[in-house]
Image (cartoon, rainbow, N blue to C red):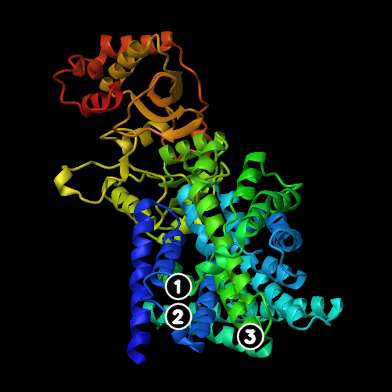
Amino acid sequence: MEGSLSLIIIIAIAAGIFARVIANFFRVPSIVFLLIFGVALGGNGLNLVQPRLLGDGLEAIVSISVALILFDGGLNLQLKELGKVSASLRNLITIGTLITLIGGGIAAYWLSEFPWTIAFLYAALVVVTGPTVVNPIVEEVGLDRRLATILEGEGVLIDAIGSVLAVVVLDVALNPTSSAFAVVSDLGLRLGVGGVLGAIAGWLLGKFLQRATFLAEDTKSAVVVAAVLGLFGIAQEIQSESGLTAVVLMGIVLRASDIPNSRALLKFKSQLVALMVSVLFILLSANLSIPSIFALGWGGVQTVLFLMFIVRPINVIVSTWNSSFTWRQKAFLSWCAPRGIVAASVASLFSILLTERGVNGGESIKALVFLTIAMTVFLQGLSAKLVAKLLGLNQPDISGLVVVGSNPIGILVARLFQANGQRVAIIDTSAELCKQAAEYDIPAFVSNGLDAKSLAEAGLDSVGTFVALTINTDVNIVIAQLAVKEFKPPRVFAVYVKEAESDRNGEPEVQQAFSARVPIKTWNQYVLQREVRVGEFLLTEEELQEQLNRFNTMFNAGILLPLLFERKGQLQIVSADMTWEKGDRILYLLYTPKALPPAQSEVLPPKTLDITPMVLSDLDIAQKTSDSNGGGSRSNKNNDSSTSPDYFLKMAKDILNRRSP
């Protein structure tokens, strides 16, 4: 028997990890393949995994796993982000829960022909969504931060509330003589006790980790795991089924604490939870009876469809009625509500309990819950990216900018993004330079760009673009690599000198900002001396080649630096391997030493950087081109662009050709 139990766990672990590998390869939610593998290995398939042999151990595995999963979900929530959607989120986990409970209960009663108590027990089990399913979808689709926050917040908070609600409904099912007051007070007591215990424990753990500087990082992670499981056990002993609420609140409060090197803790927790989810779902789906699902008939399918297409949209419409969410965002919220591991776990436990108590319907509830999981994950989870694309909500729409380097160019780029309606932030080690950025209402952080915590505080985990613009190009590429490794923003740029491809193995995701070689220090000086203008022009199909030729000449003269371009409404940083298209609106810096009087030698006030964007006409550009070709040592040096060693020549060839090199 002992050998059989060990083999079951080993197979479950191996199958779970393999399922995640395949899911990552196909870029789909891992629960899809976890469900398939679990059923295939269970009693209805190869019969290699028999969870019933674990006995009471299965219940212990489920309880511990769900506690850690929900703590991880709470740890990933940020109070400042929740505050932006607090009203809608509050409605979703309160009014929305009630709507789903009533709508799901009615559907299960009329369509699946369940008794009222069993119907509402099913509805209580499926009010939850779950971070294990929602978070991978959000990450894959690439939603804007507000929409992602409300989906993630709902998934975490409603899991705890739904689990407690399900226990209360189960008590009613087993004790039908309970009064309404007793039911409501029981629900409030469980949530209240769990919330208070979790908040206190999270605060105490945060204070301990702040002061325990003697602890190694791996020991800190072990301490957190022990604290979570300890809190869960204590809360369960004080008030049954309050443990899940406690661990969620503990995670939220701990995340709000200023914990040293919190990213290491987050990474460890996510890896541990990924393993536990994989094993748990293999075991639960292996324990599923396929004939019981077929026994539900079309009534079961209709129940789930009613939940997806009627109940969920009503839930979202009511919960976000007075919110600032657009109809597209509300439509996606209505579509994206897959059920996950918590619903499966609690349904499996309830099935065992109902069977032990001699109440009919335990196996039917579990079958309908798993059918709900399968249909919502396959229909909603797999189509989420397509739906987001059709609604115009997918990754290219991620906006926002984090800049490392509060120098004149860095501040100017941040201001241009800010003028475009995007949120920006700047990081620099100089308090004085950060103060200059703050003069323009740009959030500035006095810190080292190599500090992952500072990057996180600046919001790098929720913006679309990162750029390193310090005057040290070697530092820039290191910072950019850190940003790619730790945060994976969609677009990462840096001002650096690109070495031979064989010399650098890890930088394909770091694009060179502006051009192949940028004299960033020189251009910063130009801005401080007020010898530049911000220009813009639109590439038209009729004059595209002529415009690029003019642009090319000014590049060769070293008097023009491309900064940003707007394409299809998206403002982006120019990269060294840029391929221009008709309709692009290019923003650039133009060196104009005679346009403004030179600045005084003393340090200039922040107003010096107040460069008003101005549109230069084709005539202006032609005049500048003529000036740069017609006289002065600068232009003479660059007259023969085919032989000039000036590095702007290579930049012009790389950037301004119509076709990719």
Q: Which mark is residue 286?
A: 1
Q: Which mark is residue 235?
A: 3
CA gap between label 1 and label 2 equals 7 Å
Q: Earlier in the sequence, mark 1 or mark 2?
A: 2
Asked if 227 appears above or below 343 in the picture, the reply is below
Front position in the image: 11 or 204: 11
Within 10 Å of disc 2 (Cα), the crowding (few <14, some 14-19, many 20+) is: many
Q: Residue at x 61, y 88 (%)?
A: 234
- Residue 205 visible to an observer of this rendering: yes
Q: Amino acid at mark 1?
A: Ala
Q: Earlier in the sequence, mark 1 or mark 3?
A: 3
Q: Earlier in the sequence, mark 2 or mark 3?
A: 2
Q: Amino acid at mark 2?
A: Pro
Quarter of the figure with the N terminus: bottom left
Q: Position of residue 528 (x, y in %)?
A: 42, 34
According to the picture, the residue beneath numbered tag 2 turns out to be 51
Front position in the image: 287 or 472: 287
- Residue 445 visible to an observer of this rendering: no
Asked if 198 appears above or below 158 in the picture, the reply is below
Q: Report the label total.
A: 3
The image quadrant that residue 111 belongs to is bottom right
Q: Position of residue 655 (x, y in %)?
A: 29, 27
Tell me if label 1 and label 2 are in contact, CB under 8 Å: yes
